[in-house]
Amino acid sequence: MDKKIEIVTILENKFIAKDVCEISFNYSFDVEPGQFVNLYLNSKDKLLPRPISVCRKEGDLLTLVYGVVGKGTEELSSYEKGCKIRVSTPLGQGFYLDQVERGKSAMLIGGGIGIPPLLELSYALLEKGVRVEAVLGFKEQPFLIDDFPCNVHLASDEGTVGFHGNVLDLIKAKGLNADYYFSCGPKAMLKAVAEYFPDVQLSMEERMGCGYGACLGCVCKTKEADGITRKKVCQDGPVFWGRDVVWDE
Amino acid sequence: MDLYFGEGMLSGMNNLDMSVNIAGVKWKNPITTASGTFSVRESGAFYDLSELGALTTKGVSYEEWEGTATPRIAETYGGMLNSIGLQNKGVGPFIEEELPLLKKYDTPIIVNVVGKTIEEYCRVVERLSETDIDMLELNISCPNIKEGGISFGTEPKMAFSLVEKVRKITKKALIVKLSPNVTDITEIARSVEAAGADCLSLINTLLGMRIDVAKRKAVLANRVGGLSGPAIKPVALRMVYEVRRAVNLPIIGMGGIMTGEDAVEFLMAGADAISVGTASLIDPTAPLRIKNELREFMLEYNYKSIKEIELLEE
């Protein structure tokens, strides 16, 4: 029995961009970059947990950045400082960092609300002596860019900040490359990134039920030695190798 | 007379006995998990599963089933829709990988069985009958599987032939899980009883739908799916009440049970035991909490056994 649900007190919960919120609270569990936590809403009509990836953990302070995309995250964004909320212990398979070698280089490719988990990853990689640069794409309004402890290349769909276009166009235009690639963002972006950099580690998103591996609500098709299998995004993922993901859905 | 010293008696407290006897199988309390919402590894990471009256597995088919496309989950007001499509690795891997894990817990094992044909159901039942599982639950009612227009869960004759055939090949206690997506649930309950079932479980999910108005598309890739959660509790309760008056078989009641009080409602409606389903997705330890709440209720209202929890009717 190593998992549980805890009640935490919100220290801060504020908008940092249009439809993007940052929430923080004290959290004693160790988290790995790429893992997520389930946040449980206080209202009784919205039952399912909201799985939110870890953006930053400093000491006991956990910060999550989430998109306000529906009624659930709307309710979450209304919770004020001091409000209590149920949260799970860390869940899922984070980024694979065991094989990462000191002195090598890593490129973090993020799009929109897929950017937050790359922040914790950037710190973890720097700690391992890896040179890090981030390529971050936004629709319009950027967020978190000043928090990255590394060189950041910006792209925006509307041309409001940085390169006018998507992250992959920017990477191609500047001829960027690295020893390791990590990416999180919209599915179309992940697919394009995985085609360009097959060795990339992707953090996938899927509509989840329980968020802890019991219901099989969220699955990702992957190529295995014995054919195609359906893995649980909440447990076997959310991080998968780009070359393994089957993109037909 | 059946002499059994339940938990309460052994601990010397209040002579409270939560045990129940379901089709000849002794459960230490009337709480089990609803099929599809429990996984031995994942749920076992949160609490000691031996605390439950029985453990009910996800649906097991003969060969591997891939399940439906994603999204498979949609939240609804006070409930959720799912169209998992019974993804599972098949009975072989189940017996090799899952069963040993389930056996580690000191509580009966109920294996939920699915199939697309009578033959398929029978093959799974044959394999499982060779193992030391305690009970079988025939899932004749999953709304996400439809094969060639055959609907075991909604046509009494089909249900009868399936249960009759399965009955002949197994001595295991046989539960049949009923669908609420019928005009009269008592009709199918009676035919299943006549075919030799030992127990009924009800209800499975109600067929439902949600639409994303911005995309002008159904939220679920499968378009429709099974509705579960507190939103369906009144319907489930009414159906348990109706079936109780139609058959003599023990009933495992389920449908939106979130609290001990909900469990009591089902017991009063005529259930002999209850399953916790969607609540486990919201709170992984819900079955244990509900068991404890039921116990508190019994203490508060001075019930000595589960059997005493009955409806007072004129």
Image (tube, coloured by chain):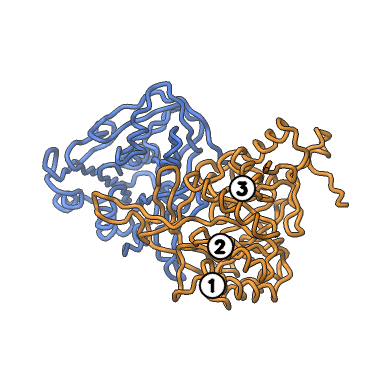
Chain colours: A blue, B orange
Mark 2 Cα shell of 10 Å, populated few (<14), some (14-19), many (≥20): many
Residue A121 rendering spot, x and y as whole percentages: 36, 41
Could you give the CA–CA distance between mark 3 and mark 2, rounded to whole angstroms?
18 Å
Task: Give the residue furthest to the top.
Answer: A82
Which chain does the numbered disc 1 sit on? B
Please determine if labels 1 and 3 lie on a single subunit. Answer: yes
Nearest the eye: A75 or A57: A75
Q: Quadrant of residue A54?
A: top left
Q: Earlier in the sequence, mark 3 or mark 2?
A: 3
Mark drawn on residue B44: 3
| Marker disc for residue B59 | 2
Does residue A201 sit above or below B8 in this rendering? Answer: below
Q: Chain of mark 2?
A: B
Badge nearest the viewer, 3 or 2: 2
- Secondary structure category for the residue under label 2: loop
Q: Is residue A4 above or below residue A227?
A: above
Residue occupied by mark 1: B63
What chain does mark 3 sit on?
Answer: B
Lateral position of residue A32 relative to residue B6, left or right: left
Q: Earlier in the sequence, mark 1 or mark 3?
A: 3
The amino acid sitting under disc 2 is: Gly
